[in-house]
Amino acid sequence: MQYVTVVLPLIVIMGVGWTLRRLRVIKGDNSNLEGMLYWVVLPALIFRSIFYSGGFAKEDVNLLYAVYLSFLIMPFISFVASPWKKNPARLGVSLLTCIRSNNIYMGIPVVSLAMGDVGVTAVSKYLGLSLVGYHILSVAFGQIGFYRKLNLDTLFGTLKELSKNPLIISSILALFCAEVLQIKLPLWVDESLKMLSEAATGLALIALGAGIQLGEMVTSIKYTWVDVLMKVAVYPLLVMSLFFVWPVAHNVRNAVILVSAMPVAVNTFIVAKGMGMDHKYAAELIATSTFISILVVPIWVYILF
């Protein structure tokens, strides 16, 4: 029962977001709430977590190896298992989504509830190491599935966009301030960042819940289940196996495996649409994997803890 209680707050707060959207308290496409999270709240959380994490040490090399090997290996597993080999628009989505976890809107809240501050610090370190490769490699493999080749212009465009990503900027800035400048944050700055950070979990879940379409989840599971299984079960199992070869601190291991088991990232829909893939299938995959992940999270918590 204690493992189930980890997801109960997720369900309740996401339910609040879903209800607020239905009551039109949250209006439109939910972009204002997500924008506030993306540009202000989550960068504050990541900056403060990395700043006080002690930076990246030599033992984090193992984390780098395990994470990037998972990014390289998982698309091949997804290709072998995919039922869409004769449908390039959906095969591209399969390869694009298999490593694109919802680290931000669901991963951080889940790890926070399961592990507390030590887990959030571990996830922030993971994000600092992985965000660039996560975006570039997922887009590259998606292109290979869809076009059967790499489009360098698209990859360079993705890299250009990453240079403006507030989560990456906050990670680099935190390391620069802590490791290079070795400054101490003024109390008022630290308290401001702390207050913003504490709002991250609730706001992220409300934003995620506001975007849920229950009807899509029920109807699409019959043909998305393979890709959902790849994302919430096979991928975290791969990450877990790689950590046996390249071990890391226990809290880092558990946090990274948990975020690897999260559903497909919400922004994957925009990426798939921009690349000309089957973006409707991507939307259905996001919705279904979100629903299934709520059922799967207690299993992963049981396995890890």
Image (tube, rainbow, N blue to C red):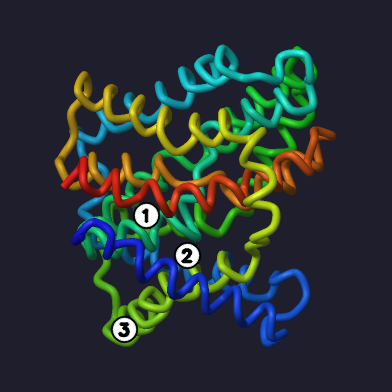
Picture quadrant where residue 182 is located: bottom left
Residue highlighted by disc 3: 191
Picture quadrant where residue 268 is located: top right
Residue highlighted by disc 1: 176
**Residue placed at 38% from the left, 46% from the top?**
296
User: Which of the pair 5/231 is nearer the observer?
Assistant: 5
| Cα separation between marks 1 and 3 | 20 Å
- Circle nearer the N terminus (1, 3): 1
| Cβ atoms at labels 1 and 3 below 8 Å apart | no
Residue 130 vertical placement versus 239 (above, below): below
The percent coordinates of residue 191 (x first, y second) are 31, 84
Callout 1: 10 Å neighbours few (<14), some, many (20+)?
some
Residue 226 vertical placement versus 292 (above, below): above
Q: Which of the image's four quarters has the N terminus? A: bottom left
| Cα separation between marks 1 and 2 | 15 Å
- For badge 1, the amino acid type reads Phe
User: Which of the pair 45/115 is nearer the observer?
Assistant: 115
| Cα separation between marks 3 and 2 | 15 Å
Picture quadrant where residue 56 is located: top left
**Residue placed at 74% from the left, 38% from the top?**
157
Which callout, 1 or 3, points to the residue nearer the camera?
3
- For badge 2, the amino acid type reads Pro
The percent coordinates of residue 36 (x first, y second) are 59, 74
Callout 2: 10 Å neighbours few (<14), some, many (20+)?
many
**Residue placed at 21% from the left, 19% from the top?**
245
Residue highlighted by disc 2: 43
The percent coordinates of residue 276 (x first, y second) are 84, 34
